[in-house]
């Protein structure tokens, strides 16, 4: 019985599965097309400023999942970090997510929580009984003024689509608070790995039995050389885009350096058309326990992903559902291949969800192998 495993991709999905299977006695080859591990979470010290740079844009770890939190803390010290986002619209600065301070500042009021809640209820468009689009959801629950100031233009810049073309479910992930809590996330555990994400993923992979092959693509034709393949690349790429390319958004970064403190905060969103970028991130503020005289910033631009670009966000529009379903059917016909992670399942996944799903996938694989005394033909991972 062969016990050699191939894992395609050295991001969190691939690294966690490699870690778990190697500790269970398997020999694991990890193939990564980039010259580093950690995927889009890759971080490195900027040579000029000394700042820990989130190379592909900022990542903040936040979770309520005890298992994911315990797992990452085995391999890195996590420093406390709270993401407090600011937003510029119509020439003024506000706090996000929309909270009591945002509402009072925006409308020049001094509302108490119940008063603010009643006020927004009056502003909401009551003629929209069952919102189906992002725009309808916003108009129904926050009203025209807040929608146009914070959501409408920002959404067009971020997704390249008018909010009337996006599902209402997107806005449900953006809370409105009727207190002064400006913590962007509402999770029990929040923090940053003290030495960066790449160091964390590298330690996850440094277990006996794991060999990492950097700058090395994996040819699907080689799958027969392995008992099983876990694939975390784009699902459509595995099938050579036989059903066309699935649509993603990608990001471009305009990097600039300065001295001192440029904007006083890690993340500032630009919600109107006064600037073409969606936000500026100042990376020294993602490591507030460090001190740096210089600073490095990213101006972030979103656009449609093309063939040579790095895919960031799956768009998952209703019109793409049939195309995705065809790829899911192809995946289910594969033998000895499991599709995992953000790209392999074509879903937007936070890091903690990615890690937890990878742990569960490894559990199921090992359980199946034990029960059958042979390698399972296919471990089903939901492609929702």
Image (spheres, helix red, strand yellow):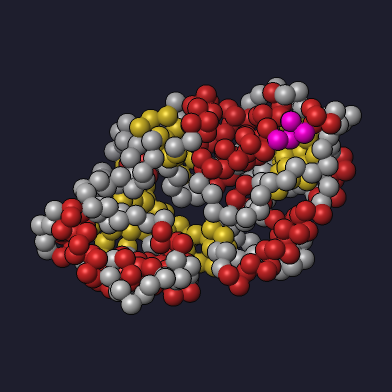
138 lies left or right of 384: left
Residue shown at the point (72%, 58%) measured from the top left: 328
35 lies left or right of 114: right
Quarter of the image containing the N terminus?
A: top right
Q: Position of residue 70 (x, y in %)?
A: 50, 27
Q: Position of residue 62 (x, y in %)?
A: 43, 40
Q: Position of residue 332 (x, y in %)?
A: 77, 53
270 lies left or right of 243: left
Residue shown at the point (69%, 68%) measured from the top left: 323
Q: Is residue 91 above or below residue 283?
A: below
Residue shown at the point (58%, 57%) measured from the top left: 311
Residue occupying the far bottom of the picture: 127
Task: Count every numbered label the image shows and give the total.
Answer: 0
Q: Is residue 384 above or below residue 71?
A: below
Does residue 25 belong to the magenta stretch?
A: no
Observer able to see residue 255: yes
> Magenta residues: mostly which secondary structure?
helix
> Relative to the observer, which residue lies in front, 15 or 147?
147
Indicate the quadrant where residue 253 lies: bottom left
Residue shown at the point (66%, 49%) measured from the top left: 382
Observer able to see residue 29: no
Q: Position of residue 172 (x, y in %)?
A: 41, 59
**Stretch in magenta:** 364-368
Q: Is residue 154 above or below residue 162?
A: above
Quarter of the image containing the C terminus?
A: bottom right
Indicate the quadrant where residue 288 lies: top left
> Relative to the observer, which residue lies in front, 195 or 181?
181
């Amino acid at each position: 019985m062969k016990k050699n495993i191939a894992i395609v991709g050295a991001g969190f999905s691939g690294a966690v599965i490699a870690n778990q299977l190697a500790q269970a006695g398997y020999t694991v080859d990890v193939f990564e097309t980039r010259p580093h591990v950690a995927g889009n979470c890759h971080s490195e010290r900027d040579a000029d400023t000394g700042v820990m740079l989130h190379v592909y844009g900022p990542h903040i770890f936040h979770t309520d999942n005890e298992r994911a939190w315990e797992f990452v803390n085995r391999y890195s010290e996590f420093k406390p970090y709270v993401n407090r986002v600011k937003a510029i619209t119509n020439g003024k600065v506000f706090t996000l997510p929309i909270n009591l301070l945002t509402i009072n500042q925006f409308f020049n009021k001094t509302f108490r929580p119940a008063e603010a809640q009643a006020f927004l209820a009056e502003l909401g468009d009551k003629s929209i009984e069952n919102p189906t689009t992002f725009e309808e959801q916003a108009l129904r629950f926050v009203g025209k003024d807040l929608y146009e100031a914070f959501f409408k233009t920002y959404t067009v810049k971020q997704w390249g689509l008018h909010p009337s073309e996006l599902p209402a479910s997107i806005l449900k992930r953006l809370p409105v608070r009727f207190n002064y809590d400006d913590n962007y996330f509402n999770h029990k555990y929040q923090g940053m790995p003290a030495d960066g994400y790449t160091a964390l993923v590298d330690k996850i992979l440094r277990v006996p039995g794991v060999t990492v092959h950097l700058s090395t693509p994996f040819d699907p034709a080689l799958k027969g050389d392995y008992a099983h393949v876990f694939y975390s690349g784009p699902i459509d790429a595995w099938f050579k885009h036989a059903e066309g390319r699935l649509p993603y958004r990608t990001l471009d970064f305009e990097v600039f350096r300065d001295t001192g403190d440029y904007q006083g905060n890690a993340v500032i969103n630009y919600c109107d058309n006064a600037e073409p970028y969606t936000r500026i991130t100042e990376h020294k503020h993602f490591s507030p326990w460090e001190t740096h005289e210089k600073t490095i910033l990213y101006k972030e631009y979103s656009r449609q992903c093309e063939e040579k670009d790095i895919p960031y966000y799956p768009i998952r529009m209703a019109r793409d559902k049939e195309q995705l379903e065809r790829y899911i059917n192809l995946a289910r016909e594969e033998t000895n291949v499991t599709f995992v992670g953000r790209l392999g399942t074509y879903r937007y996944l936070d890091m903690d969800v990615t890690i937890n799903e990878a742990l569960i996938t490894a559990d199921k694989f090992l359980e199946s192998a034990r029960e059958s005394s042979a390698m399972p033909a296919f471990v089903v991972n939901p492609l929702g």
